Amino acid sequence: MNFPSKLIEDAVSEFEKLPGIGRKTALRLVLHLLRQSNESVTLFSDRIQKMRSEIRFCKTCHNISDGEYCNICSSRVRNRTVVCVVENFRDVIAIENTAQYNGLYHVLGGVISPLEGIGPDALNIESLIQRTHAGEINEVLMALSPTMEGDTTIFYISRKLQNNTGIKITTLARGVAFGGELEYTDDLTLARSIATRLPYENYLVNRE
């Protein structure tokens, strides 16, 4: 693709680095910005820069946040006895969109994957264990994608929690297919999975 301007070519190359953005789409985005006023483009770039430089992570659940603690952890109307363990921030958004869950979250920042060199120490697992020792939580809902790596992570965490007899470990119901990614599950299926969650012991029996 030939460009009449090196500046446009450089801008297209940057947009093209975004996931799901091809060269033609990147060009459309650049030409759209070119048609906007200087003030609009400046506001756009300022907000992106501000997001990147000022975004923080919640000290409690590791979710993205504007301050020390996210809006969910700071809320007084959330059920503080249940914590939903997820892989990343996108899973929090997916579950929140179902409007079927009113508890807290804990973002692991990934799943255990020996092939990729990701072990338990690389994830936010120890802080989860510490939260359960505080005494307020009585249920840990494992909402990880039903993959081999997700199952391995659930098993590891459940073993770490087995001595805490006051904690009930549950998982998403069978509405979420094995091998699928949680963020791509439709809202209705995910909502039903949360509403009909199962004890982790039953999940193990069903998998055998």
Image (spheres, rainbow, N blue to C red):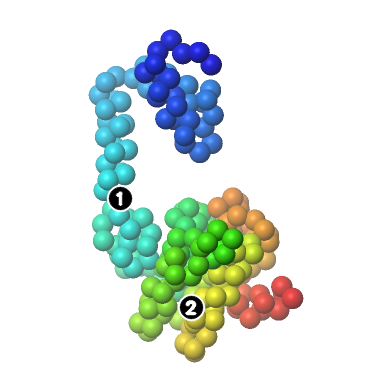
- Residue 97 lies, with reference to residue 35, above or below; the image says below
- Residue type (three-letter) at the residue carrying disc 2: Glu
Q: Which mark is residue 139?
A: 2
Residue 55: x and y in percent read: 30, 50
Q: Going by the image, does 26 lie left or right of 154?
A: left
Q: Going by the image, does 57 lie left or right of 167?
A: left
Q: Which mark is residue 55?
A: 1
Local secondary structure at mark 1 = loop
Local secondary structure at mark 2 = strand
Which numbered disc, 1 or 2, marks the residue that appears first in the sequence? 1
Q: Depth check: 21 or 139 in front? A: 21
Q: Quadrant of residue 60?
A: bottom left
- Residue type (three-letter) at the residue carrying disc 1: Ile
Q: Quadrant of residue 128?
A: bottom left
Label 2 neighbour load within 10 Å: few <14, some 14-19, many 20+? some
Residue 91: x and y in percent read: 50, 56
Label 1 – label 2 distance at C-alpha: 29 Å
Residue visible at 67% across and 58% down in the picture: 179
Residue visible at 26% across and 48% down in the picture: 54
Q: Quadrant of residue 80?
A: bottom left
